[in-house]
Amino acid sequence: MPQTTISSVNTICAINTAIQEIMAVVVPPSAECCMTVGELHAGEIGGGNVIPASAYLAGTLRTFDEEIRAKVKAALEQAVAATAAARGAQAVVTYSHSAPAGLQNPTCRVLATETCTALVGREAVVDMETLWGGTYATTNASEDFAYISEQVPSAILWLAAGSPEKGYSWPSHNPKTDFDDSVLYVGTAAYAAVATAWLEMH
């Protein structure tokens, strides 16, 4: 009967709440850190009369500070285990993927900016370091390329693939997002041009 069962639904919901509290009490207000849950599953469609045996949620943790990352992960593991135990359940935290902060080398950044400007024109190139007063000088984009940027001087380029004027109104993390594939050649040309410029300099 429900009253004698350990509820995975109640447990996973409590864990989700605990995750939000971690950000409020563990992360300093001045730290750039974001932890979000984008997936939560328990039970089957049409199984409203069945207590599911298990449940899970998944999300992301983004920060530029490795010390903050370690602190949040430790708090997360402790909160998940304790929250589940308080309800007679067991829960563990697993990490499927992790990437460090991507590093922009100033020389590479200037080279990429100047090369792309020569390729497509000043009006088509936006410097994220100065856009809107530097609002986007740092961004919490999760990017595997960050591993390379730790080893060799690098610059990260973003390709704008759609505008509201052309019907592309949704941001990248929205389920309705779509991209304008017709601009992909610009990205290919930009990478080739920057690589060629670097080789010519060296």
Image (tube, grey):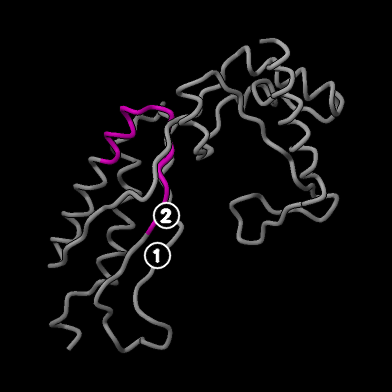
Residue 70 part of the magenta segment: yes
Circle 1/circle 2 CB separation < 8 Å: yes
* 119 lies left or right of 68: right
Comparing 64 with 182, the one in front is 182
Which secondary structure, mark 2?
strand
Q: Residue at x 74, y 53 (%)?
A: 169
Residue for badge 2: 37
142 vs 37: above or below = above
Locate residue 200, reporting x and y percent: 73, 13
> Which numbered dot is residue 40?
1
* 55 lies left or right of 111: left
* 153 lies left or right of 113: left
- Residue 91 sits in which quadrant? bottom left
Q: What quarter of the picture does the C terminus occupy?
A: top right
37 vs 44: above or below = above
Q: What quarter of the picture does the N terminus occupy?
A: bottom left
User: Given the image, on which type of amino acid does mark 2 rest?
Assistant: Val
User: Given the image, on which type of amino acid does mark 1 rest?
Assistant: Leu
196 vs 76: above or below = above
Residue 144 part of the magenta segment: no
Q: Which residues are magenta?
A: 58-73
Q: Residue at x 85, y 52 (%)?
A: 166
Q: Residue at x 43, y 40 (%)?
A: 34
Q: Residues within 10 Å of mark 2 (few under 14, many from 20)?
A: few
Locate residue 19, reporting x and y percent: 32, 50
124 vs 47: above or below = above
Locate residue 139, reporting x and y percent: 55, 32
